[in-house]
Amino acid sequence: MLRDITIGQYYNTKSSLHSLDPRCKLIGLLVMMVLIFVAHSVFEYAFVAIITIALALLSKVPAMYILKGMKPVWLIVAFTAVINIFMGGGEEVIFTWWIFTATKESVLLALSMMLRVVLLVMVSTLLTLTTSPTVLTSGLEKLLKPLEKIKFPSHEVAMMMSIALRFIPTLGEEAEKIMKAQAARGNDIESGGIMKKISGMIPLFVPLFISAFRRADELAMAMECRCYAGGCHRTSFRKLEYKKNDIVAFLLMVTACLVIVIYRMVGF
């Protein structure tokens, strides 16, 4: 399952999303996150879901590749659904089991939360799949640059976030290797109940944390050997410029927001 993690990876192809300015895509991600969280009706959820599917089609990334990246998230989605079903409250009771009670309102809340998590992961994955880490770092730094007037380290923050995204699949591969090595030594974490799987995962965390800290130390040493100093008026090889496609994308973002606002005002 860990090898299926696609967030943080870049899928190299030519598409409308790949050609957009990274600043435009970051703002678009922020807009999509706001739309996902403010949605509360069937129309609004369907509208946001259609936009997400359209973005996936425009990216020209294979659908199976995107869906493969959703596999590690299903456990979080299921846990979110269970918590909301039995702790969401409500009056119209559907069924009761032991000390747990599920209501119509809690089930609807669980469905909405599940859809929000799935949509958030999909749009975040599309951002990293269509933007290389270097370009993403440059775009994030440009967006945060006005905050430098209040002594905000925009370059350092952008670099940290891009490195974190880049190392998500790397740590996934490392965890997969550790699991195979431990399975060869008789530690079976694939079979048995949930509690057995959880207890079998504990020996995985120690070597994984050690590996993560070792990689961080090696990266820091490599940056020091190359005399890296963040924020010292560094220049970029590629200059970011907004193009015609970016303007169209911004207009579509505004249109999507207006659709939600008008729908709320009309009050269907």
Image: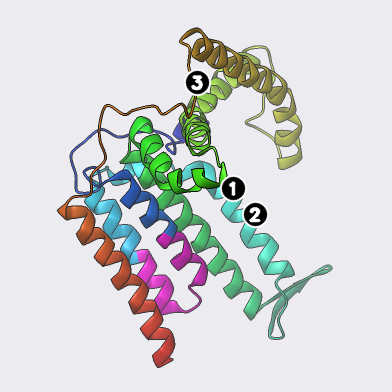
Quadrant of the image containing the C terminus: bottom left
Residue 33 on the magenta segment: yes
Q: Where is residue 251 drawn, in percent x and y?
A: 25, 66
Numbered mark located on residue 66 in the image = none
Q: In the displayed structure, does residue 237 sit left or right of residue 120? A: left
* Cβ–Cβ under 8 Å for marks 1 and 2: yes
Residue extending furthest left?
Answer: 244
Q: Where is residue 169 drawn, in percent x and y?
A: 48, 29
- Mark 3 belongs to which amino acid? Ala
On the question of residue 212 being in view, the answer is yes
Q: Give the SS element for disc 2.
A: helix
Q: Where is residue 129 drawn, in percent x and y?
A: 34, 39
Tell me what residue is drawn at x 40 percent, y 81 percent.
261
* Cβ–Cβ under 8 Å for marks 1 and 3: no
- Of tags 3 and 2, the one toward the viewer is 3
Q: In the displayed structure, does residue 83 sit left or right of residue 217? A: right
Residue 49, relative to residue 208: is it above or below?
A: below
Q: Give the SS element for disc 3.
A: loop
Numbered mark located on residue 79 in the image = 2
Residue 93, relative to residue 211: is it above or below?
A: below
Residue extending furthest right?
Answer: 99
Numbered mark located on residue 75 in the image = 1
Q: CA gap, disc 3 to disc 2?
A: 43 Å
Numbered mark located on residue 229 in the image = 3
Q: In the displayed structure, does residue 104 sit left or right of residue 145? A: right
- Mark 1 belongs to which amino acid? Leu
Sequence-wise, the earlier of marks 3 and 2 is 2
The region drawn magenta spans 31-49
Tell me what residue is drawn at x 48 percent, y 29 percent.
231
The image quarter in which residue 205 lies: top right
Q: Where is residue 110 drawn, in percent x and y?
A: 60, 67
Sequence-wise, the earlier of marks 1 and 3 is 1
